[in-house]
Each structure stands twice: as C-alpha cells, then as structure tokens.
C-alpha cells in the first residue's frame, strides 16, 4: 500500500462526511417550492448554519462554491469590481488561484503591488502599514493567505485584519490550508474580508468549498439563477454542502494537532540526522502542524519525487496544482532560495489519518532515493 504524505493536496474523506453526503442525497432542488425542495433547502441551511458557527461568522456570510479556487476568483475579482479602486496588494507566496486572479486584474488595468516578505515567507507588516498610511483610498484589496500550502507558514492574520479594517480595505484571505487546523477565523476577522475555503483539505469530498464574505459583498461575476445571494449562481449541491459541514465539524472536534505536530517533528529531526545537508524551509516561522518543506541540495525534486513514488511514497514537489510543470516553486524563490535549491525541495504533508508508520516508511526509503537523485543530477550536469 502506498504511503500517502500529500494530504495538503487532498486528504482522506471522513466517513461521517460520506454518510452525511448519502443521507442528504434525497431528491430535491433547494430552490424548488414543493415539499422535496423545501426539505433540500432545510438540509442546505442547516449545513450553512453549522459551517458558519464553526467559522465564527453569520450564516448569511457563507456562500457555497466548488472550492477555494472559485472562492479566490470571486473574492478577488468581485472585491476589486466592488470598490472601483485600482491598486491590489498581494503576497508573492500566494497559491496560483490568487496569483493568476490578480495577474488577470493587472491585464485589465489594475496596479498590482507585491508585499514584502521575510525569508520564512512572513509578511512585513511595517511596510504594509506604510503603504496603507500613504494612500489607502486607492487600494481595492490586500490578498494574503492564512497559511502557505508549500511551507505551512502562518501569516499574522490578526494584525493584517486589524490594519485593513482601520482603512476599510478588503482583506482577501485564502484559508484553504488553515481551516481545519487553526482556530476559528471569527476570532480575528475585524473588517471587510473575503475568505476562501476548500472542503477536500479537511475531509469533505472534492468539489465543495465556501466563500466567506464578511462585512462586504463582492460584485457578482457569473450570472444565472441567482442562488447563493446572486454571488454564485447554479443549483447548490446540497449533499456536498452537508458533507462539508460534517467534515468541518469533525475536523474541529478532532484534537489531532499535537499528534500531527509530533509526527512532523519526528520526520524533520530524523531527516536531518539521515541527510545532514537537508534544510527545513520556513523553520523560523509559526507553521501549520502538518506541512514540511525540505530542500535536498544536489537533487532535483522531480527525480526525487519519482524515486520515492517508485518506493511507494507519495509526496509533492510543490503545490499539486502546479506539479507536473518543471518549474522551481515560486514560493521558495520569493523566500530567497536560489533556483537550484528551490528545485531541490519536496513537500511532505500529513493529515488526520497519518501515522508513525508513514514516517518510518519515508525514512527507510529516503536516503537511497536522495543518493540516487544526486547521482542522476550529477550525471545530467556533467553531460551539459
Ligand atoms: N489555495 C490554496 C492555498 C491551496 O492549497 C489550494 C489547493 O491546493 C487551493 C487554493 C485550491 O483549492 P481547490 O482545490 O479547493 O480549488
């Protein structure tokens, strides 16, 4: 059986979420007025209430979407159109769902400005404060993720939210990796904000997520039946929404963080012992307990990934959405790694089903894979 260390790409569906999906799969369109429709509507609104309660927001703030990519698109483009302002401030370590949405705005005439980060990928609040102080009225939104999908770096969202709230600038926060691991965002939301949530990162099936629109309403981007308060038209997948709410409730109740943090510590300490040249990325930052980005100097990540795969270990050479494209991680480059090191890095990510046996299997396979990947690279470089 393959050892799965790629839970940040997608994690196991929780059985209770599957059960909620099946139970809620009765016939009925939640927009229909008859009894079946009303039954479906009831299930949908219960799911919304449960999700909202766990997130610490109002049910009316929750819009069901297909996942974080769609939520990022609506949050960013919809907020930009809403304000009529022209500047967008964005962190360089964002997921492509954010980066490409912002880049698209740039092609439409928006002024895109990169926020400064340190070598762990943490936002420089002082320079953001300076930018806001100088001309906040021209800023449409600030986009900074809650936690990074490649390194696990957690951003100081509480201060960010407060700064943006002071100026009533919308904060778009991609919360795809953080939700299910970190406390409720209701604890730090302070002013207008949009949050992107992805169900399959915490045990819901793939294909359901949410946008939280807190003290703001993004402009409608797609048009149709007017579901989800006009922001996301299309028949709402009731059974998936029920599964999302159940998975989230269980992820919150599951006190897994200490156990997973201990497994990650075991992984990182042992890797450093076995491969002394290895380096843990963002180790100086506060990180999610489940993600570890490690650089193996002298290797190429795609070769190492395939060698580990052949040994039955699944991990990632970057974010799943950009894997397959042989480019060094933009996140690690933005943190100051050079191309060779950024291209020599793997992400191991744990999830609610991870065990110590998974870590032991990785440690058993890793030294030989690193050795072989180094030889491959040396041969390729030698030939060039
Ligand atoms: N944002 C982040 C930080 C992610 O890690 C991911 C998925 O890898 C996404 C957005 C996209 O999420 P989804 O698959 O729900 O569209």
Image: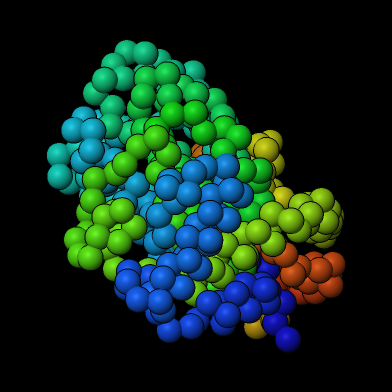
Quadrant for the N terminus in the image: bottom right
Q: How many marks?
A: 0
Viewer-proximal residue among 192 and 111: 192
Residue 119 image point, x, y percent: 57, 35
* Residue at position x 49%, y 74% in the image: 239
Q: Nearer the viewer, residue 118 or 296?
A: 118
Q: How is the image coloured?
A: rainbow
In this picture, residue 324 sits left or right of residue 228: right
Residue 17 placement: quadrant: bottom right
**Residue beneath the point at 62% across and 65% down:** 246
Quarter of the image with the C terminus is bottom left
Q: Residue at x 54, y 25 (%)?
A: 159
Where residue 269 appears, as percent x and y from the top left, is 82, 52
Residue 44, image x, y percentages: 47, 65
Height in image: 221 above or below 371?
Answer: above
Q: Is residue 166 visible?
A: yes
Q: Is residue 124 visible?
A: no
Which residue occupies the extreme front position in the image? Answer: 35
Q: Nearer the viewer, residue 16 or 327?
A: 16
**107, above or below 259, in the image:** above
Q: Is 77 on the left or on the right of 364, as rendered?
A: left
| Residue pictured at 56% horizontal, 70% vertical | 243
* Horizontal and vertical percent position of residue 33: 32, 71
């Amino acid at each position: 059986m393959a050892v799965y260390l790629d839970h940040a790409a997608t994690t196991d569906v929780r059985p209770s979420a599957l059960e909620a999906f099946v139970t809620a799969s009765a016939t009925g369109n939640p927009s229909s007025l008859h009894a079946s429709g009303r039954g479906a509507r009831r299930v949908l609104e219960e799911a919304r209430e449960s999700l909202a309660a766990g997130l610490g927001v109002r049910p009316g703030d929750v819009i069901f979407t297909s996942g974080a990519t769609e939520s990022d698109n609506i949050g960013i483009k919809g907020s930009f159109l809403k304000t009529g302002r022209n500047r967008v401030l964005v962190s360089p370590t964002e997921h492509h769902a954010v980066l490409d949405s912002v880049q698209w705005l740039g092609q439409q005439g928006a002024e895109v400005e990169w926020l400064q980060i340190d070598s762990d990928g943490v936002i420089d609040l002082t320079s953001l404060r300076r930018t806001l102080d100088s001309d906040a009225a021209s800023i449409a939104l600030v986009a900074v993720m809650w936690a990074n999908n490649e390194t696990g770096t957690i951003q100081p969202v509480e201060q960010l939210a407060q700064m943006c709230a002071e100026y009533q600038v919308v904060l778009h926060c991609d919360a795809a990796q953080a939700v299910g691991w970190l406390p409720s965002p209701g604890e730090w939301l302070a002013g207008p904000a949009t949050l992107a949530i992805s169900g399959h990162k915490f045990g819901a099936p793939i294909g359901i997520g949410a946008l939280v629109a807190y003290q703001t309403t993004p402009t409608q981007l797609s048009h149709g039946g007017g579901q989800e308060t006009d922001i996301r038209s299309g028949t709402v997948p009731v059974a998936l929404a029920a599964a999302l709410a159940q998975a989230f409730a269980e992820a919150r109740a599951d006190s897994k963080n200490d156990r997973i943090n201990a497994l990650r510590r075991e992984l990182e300490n042992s890797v450093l012992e076995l491969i002394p040249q290895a380096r843990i990325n963002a180790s100086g930052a506060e990180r999610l307990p489940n993600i570890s980005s490690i650089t193996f100097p002298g290797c190429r990540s795609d070769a190492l990934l395939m060698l580990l795969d052949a040994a039955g270990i699944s991990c990632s050479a970057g974010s799943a959405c950009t894997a397959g494209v042989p480019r060094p991680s933009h996140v690690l480059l933005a943190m100051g790694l050079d191309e060779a090191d950024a291209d020599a890095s793997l992400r191991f990510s744990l999830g609610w089903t991870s065990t110590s046996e998974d870590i032991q299997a990785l440690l058993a396979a890793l030294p030989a894979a690193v050795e072989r990947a180094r030889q491959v690279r040396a041969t390729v470089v030698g030939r060039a």
